[in-house]
Image: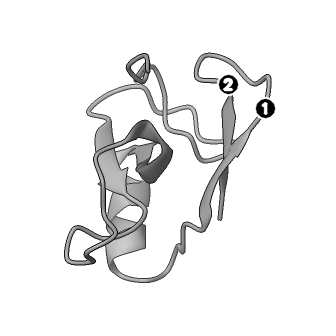
Amino acid sequence: MSKLIKNKCEIDGCEETLNLELHHIIPRTDVRCTNDKSNLAILCPCHHALTHSNHLILLGIFPSTKLPNNRILVY
């Protein structure tokens, strides 16, 4: 599997391209957690903080033709 291209936050409408972070959709404390790209979301620091405060809930990744990673973040 290829690596994720971290060029901007994956939340629709967010154009942040700096200081991007990886977030585990299934939390690292869960035994089902993996470092596979299907469990990782590319987020800006603001959206990453919102996920950890439960103000933004990430449900998963849906395959698509959306570049650069051919997927859509579902939240």
**Going 44% across and 21% down the picture, which residue do you hit?**
1
Which image quarter: residue 44? top left
CB atoms at circles 2 and 1 under 8 Å apart? yes
Residue 72 rendering spot, x and y as whole percentages: 69, 41
In this orientation, which residue lies closer to the viewer: 61 or 45? 61
Give the CA separation, mark 2 to mark 1.
5 Å
Instruction: Identify the amino acid type marked 1.
Output: Ser
| Residue ID for mark 1 | 64
In this picture, residue 69 sits left or right of residue 72: left
Which of the two residues, 52 or 60, is positioned nearer the viewer here?
Answer: 60
Q: How crowded is mark 2: few (under 14 residues within 10 Å), some or many (20 or more)?
A: few
Q: Where is residue 56 in the image (x, y as percent from the top left)?
A: 52, 73
* Residue identified by numbered label 2: 70
In the image shown, does 72 or 17 lie closer to the viewer?
72
**Number of numbered discs:** 2
* Residue at left offset 60%, top offset 47%: 11
Q: How crowded is mark 1: few (under 14 residues within 10 Å), some or many (20 or more)?
A: few
Query: Farthest bottom residue?
Result: 54
Q: Where is residue 58 in the image (x, y as percent from the top left)?
A: 54, 66
Pick the quarter of the image with the C terminus: bottom right
Q: Is mark 1 on a helix, strand or loop?
A: loop
Q: Which residue is drawn at 44% across and 57% down?
A: 47
